[in-house]
Amino acid sequence: MHLIKSLLKVLNHPLNRNTKFKTFFILLWWKINQLFFKIPAIIEIAPNRKCICKPESSFGSLIVYTNRPEYLEMRLTELLLNTDSTFLDVGAGIGDFSLIASSKITTGKIFAFEPSEEPLSTLMENIAINFLEKKIKVIDEVASNKVGTIKFNEESVSEVSHIETGENGVVKKTTTLDKVIENNKLTTVDLIKIDVEGAESLVIEGLEKSFESKLIKALIIELNSNASQFNSSKVKLAKKLINHNFKVYVINDESLTKFKPNNVDENETINVLAVHKSFEKKSLLNQFLS
């Protein structure tokens, strides 16, 4: 049943609806490739931006199937960035969001945070094949609420590697986004993407100074069902953002809906967009509001 649901989701993806037959054969070929040939694919994820997708990468496979797995999140990234924007990609993985951001940002800055070894290696390859070494600064530390060290769990499925709340894991260096913003003398941050498998509250705690200084314009955050392991919840995080004068929207497949605490299932992972009330581009969101 799970396989059927996954197949239907791929076939009904906004970029696949009119090419379902072709998509099915791409999916079939990739499954065969994963089993026997193990040849990486190179997908154009944005204009003049190539993304290496390896057979062992679950998210890389989704890029092969759909081009843009997180369709609206990636579209919003394009819309919310300008040529001179600053973008922080926290939990950058293989670099898909950073690559998309780099297709818009020419004079601005991109910081990609990725502490997990396997996706970090592919991230570096993706930066190299696109000649983006001077545009994307990679930070191979864990974004958290303090500068120091923390236990980190390297999962076999690298896209879900995460901060360890128990005694297992390897020791990784940590930093805070406030520290990175301060060290790089950033006066504004146009967009932060956060995907850290439940530890969102720690990343947000490490942004308090920037929130108080009103440096952050917008965030795209995966609110993971593992938030309870970090003594947090989706509702707590959303309310914290609201208290900092952000409007919070739930990102659906192709639309945005206002975040309503009473409608939240804490056992379900959702993505949200938080836009500061002063952000000049908020009018662009009207086309997605439902």
Image (tube, rainbow, N blue to C red):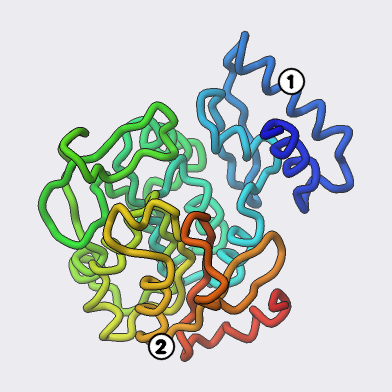
Front residue of this view, candidates 10 and 83: 10
Residue 207 pos. (x, y %)? 27, 71
What crowding class fits label 1: few (fewer than 14 Cα within 10 Å), some (14-19), or many (20 or more)? few
Q: Is residue 108 above or below residue 128?
A: below
Q: In this view, does 78 lie above or below 55?
A: below
Looking at the rendered structure, the kind of residue marked 2 is Asn
Looking at the rendered structure, the kind of residue marked 1 is Trp
Q: Would residue 290 appear left or right of 229 to someone viewing this image?
A: right
**Furthest-bottom residue in this view:** 278
Which is more foreground, mark 1 or mark 2?
2
The residue lying at 42 percent from left, 74 percent from top is 238
The residue lying at 70 percent from left, 69 percent from top is 255
Please identify the quadrant where the C terminus is shown: bottom right
Quickly name the residue at label 1: 29
Q: Would residue 173 appear left or right of 8 to someone viewing this image?
A: left
Distance between mark 1 and mark 2 Cα atoms: 48 Å
Residue 250 pos. (x, y %)? 58, 69
User: Cβ–Cβ below 8 Å for labels 1 and 2?
Assistant: no
Please report whichever mark, 1 or 2, sits nearer to the chain's N-terminal start: 1
Quickly name the residue at label 2: 245
Residue 287 pos. (x, y %)? 73, 78
In what element is the residue under mark 2?
A: loop
Front residue of this view, candidates 212 and 81: 212
What crowding class fits label 2: few (fewer than 14 Cα within 10 Å), some (14-19), or many (20 or more)? some
The residue lying at 42 percent from left, 72 percent from top is 235
Q: In which quarter of the image is residue 209?
A: bottom left
Residue 119 pos. (x, y %)? 41, 35
Q: Would residue 64 appear left or right of 240 to someone viewing this image?
A: right
Please identify the quadrant where the N terminus is shown: top right
